[in-house]
Image (cartoon, coloured by chain):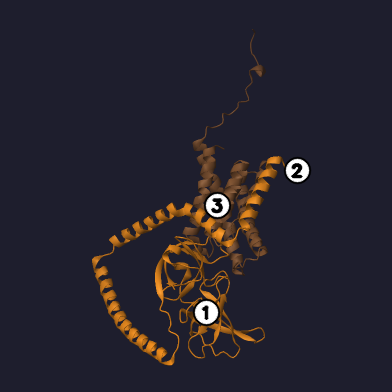
């Protein structure tokens, strides 16, 4: 038989949980923001210790090594400038042709850099937190990527930070297209909780001509992710549902477990 | 258990949640993050008062859900039920034995994530589950089991350092003294 204080505590905890679980979505985000602000001093501490460690690491790099890296970066910079000039010329040509045919102009990407500050402590979600909030222009459903490829989309936004749900989480399905060949489209889904670098591209046509090594990019369908963001490469394929459609395993271009900085594509 | 000890365990809960979210060493190495909260709840359930145990469950659960994509408050119930069960049975548990602490830590670290996932699925949240989850569950269970005796070791040492030691009672009673010789 339970004693009276036990009853009181039990009722209080159950009541608190019920109230919290029944709060509307926007209020939950606000409450999470308020509680999350308790961690701000620790973020600062972790950041400064990280910077201190980086500075200490930089101090011990020999000068000759730095000069070599500097030279390589200069070379890369010149190559990239040339490519940018070429890309700009192609862009102008593309714009002219679009105007000629009366097609709608494509909005250019406006990327903004953000630091990854936290990872989801629960093993059954694949999310990260970044230090870009609504005051910086972040909004729900904005695409997040690195220079290697797609990372995910923003799922929650507070004033100073946002939660990004990564590709491979059940709440981030992406319409993807096989770039080379027939441009077949499918839906990119999780392949399981263990290996975050492998995903499944489902609902491809049963006669899809797919080969390992083919590039997979976003198709632009669905309206969340713009067309052409690199996702990864096909590893292998198989027929599923008695040959009704084809499924391909895709190795992601981005290493999701080593993310430090990401780009958010602002509208 | 003094107020200072209660504050210390609450601070430890806060730091544990931050550590789980900020440092991914175990995730890179083993493919799963170790959860220290069940180990802290075992300590709170076996050593602290009902109020402190409840506060650890509520604070730990809320902080964990804040940094995670969990619905806010869903982790509070499994943590509280674990602490509550241990609190009620604490006199029957060999809580000073390291092996008992390890076994209870194992059971707690296995039960809390299972119950949380069950609650998530019941409330129709699409958690990422599959055969790989079995490995993650084993890592969490073993990690929590190993962490529990360490939590006891640390907090018992802190408790001994901060509190007065209880005076030991001797078995000597003056009225039972055998008097020798003649008086």
Classed neighbour count for the residue bearing mark 1: other residues with Cα under 10 Å, few (<14), some (14–19), many (≥20)? many
Kindly identify which chain the residue marked by label 2 belongs to: A
Estimate the x, y position of residue B37 in percent, counting from the top left. Answer: 56, 53
In the rendered image of the structure, the colour used to display chain B is brown
Residue A172 in which image quadrant: bottom right
Foreground of the two, B12 or A163: A163
Q: Are marks 2 and 3 in contact (CB under 8 Å)?
A: no
Instruction: Tell me if residue B69 comes above or below residue A191 in the rendering.
Output: above
- Colour-to-chain, orange: A
Q: Give the distance between the C-alpha atoms of the residues marked 2 and 3, in whole angstroms.
A: 33 Å
Classed neighbour count for the residue bearing mark 2: other residues with Cα under 10 Å, few (<14), some (14–19), many (≥20)? few
Element under label 1? strand
Label 2 in the same subunit as label 3 = no
Question: Residue beneath label 2, please?
Answer: A1
Please give left or right for residue B71 compared with residue B24 in the image.
right
Question: Residue beneath label 1, please?
Answer: A250
The residue that appears at 63% across and 25% down in the rendered structure is: B171
Kindly identify which chain the residue marked by label 1 belongs to: A
Mark closer to the observer (2, 3): 2
Q: Earlier in the sequence, mark 1 or mark 2?
A: 2
Disc on res. B147: 3
């Amino acid at each position: 038989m339970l004693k009276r204080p036990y009853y009181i505590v039990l009722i209080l905890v159950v009541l608190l949980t019920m109230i919290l679980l029944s709060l509307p979505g926007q209020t939950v985000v606000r409450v999470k923001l308020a509680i999350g602000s308790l961690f701000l001093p620790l973020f600062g501490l972790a950041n400064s210790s990280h910077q201190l460690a980086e500075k200490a690491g930089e101090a011990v790099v020999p000068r000759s090594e730095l000069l070599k890296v500097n030279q390589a970066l200069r070379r890369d910079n010149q190559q990239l400038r040339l490519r940018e000039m070429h890309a700009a010329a192609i862009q102008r040509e593309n714009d002219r042709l679009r105007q000629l045919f009366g097609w709608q102009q494509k909005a250019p990407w406006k990327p903004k850099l953000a630091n990854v500050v936290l990872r989801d402590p629960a093993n059954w979600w694949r999310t990260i937190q970044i230090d870009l909030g609504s005051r910086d222009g972040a909004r729900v459903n904005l695409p997040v990527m690195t220079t290697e490829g797609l990372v995910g989309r923003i799922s929650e936004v507070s004033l100073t930070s946002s939660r990004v749900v990564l590709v491979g989480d059940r709440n981030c399905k992406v319409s993807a297209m096989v770039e080379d060949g027939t441009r077949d489209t499918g839906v990119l889904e999780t392949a399981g909780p263990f290996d975050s670098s492998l995903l499944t591209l489902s609902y491809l046509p049963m006669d899809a001509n797919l080969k390992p090594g083919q590039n997979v990019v976003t198709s632009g369908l669905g309206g969340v992710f713009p067309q052409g963001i690199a996702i990864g490469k096909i590893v292998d394929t198989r027929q599923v549902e008695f040959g009704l459609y084809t499924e391909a395993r895709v190795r992601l271009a981005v290493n999701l477990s080593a993310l430090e900085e990401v780009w958010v594509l602002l509208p | 258990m003094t107020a200072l000890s209660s504050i210390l365990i609450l601070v430890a809960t806060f730091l544990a949640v931050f550590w789980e979210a900020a440092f991914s060493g175990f995730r890179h190495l083993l493919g799963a993050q170790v959860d220290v909260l069940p180990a802290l709840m075992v300590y709170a359930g076996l050593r602290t008062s009902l109020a402190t145990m409840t506060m650890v469950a509520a604070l730990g659960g809320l902080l964990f859900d804040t940094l995670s994509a969990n619905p806010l408050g869903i982790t509070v119930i499994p943590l509280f039920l674990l602490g509550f069960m241990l609190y009620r049975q604490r006199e029957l548990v060999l809580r000073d034995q390291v092996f008992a602490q390890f076994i209870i830590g194992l059971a707690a670290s296995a039960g809390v994530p299972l119950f949380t996932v069950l609650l998530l699925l019941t409330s129709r949240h699409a958690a990422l589950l599959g055969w790989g989850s079995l490995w993650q569950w084993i890592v969490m269970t073993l990690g929590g089991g190993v962490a529990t005796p360490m939590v006891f070791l640390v907090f018992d040492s802190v408790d001994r350092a901060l509190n007065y030691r209880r005076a030991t009672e001797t078995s000597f009673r003056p009225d039972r003294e055998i008097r020798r010789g003649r008086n």
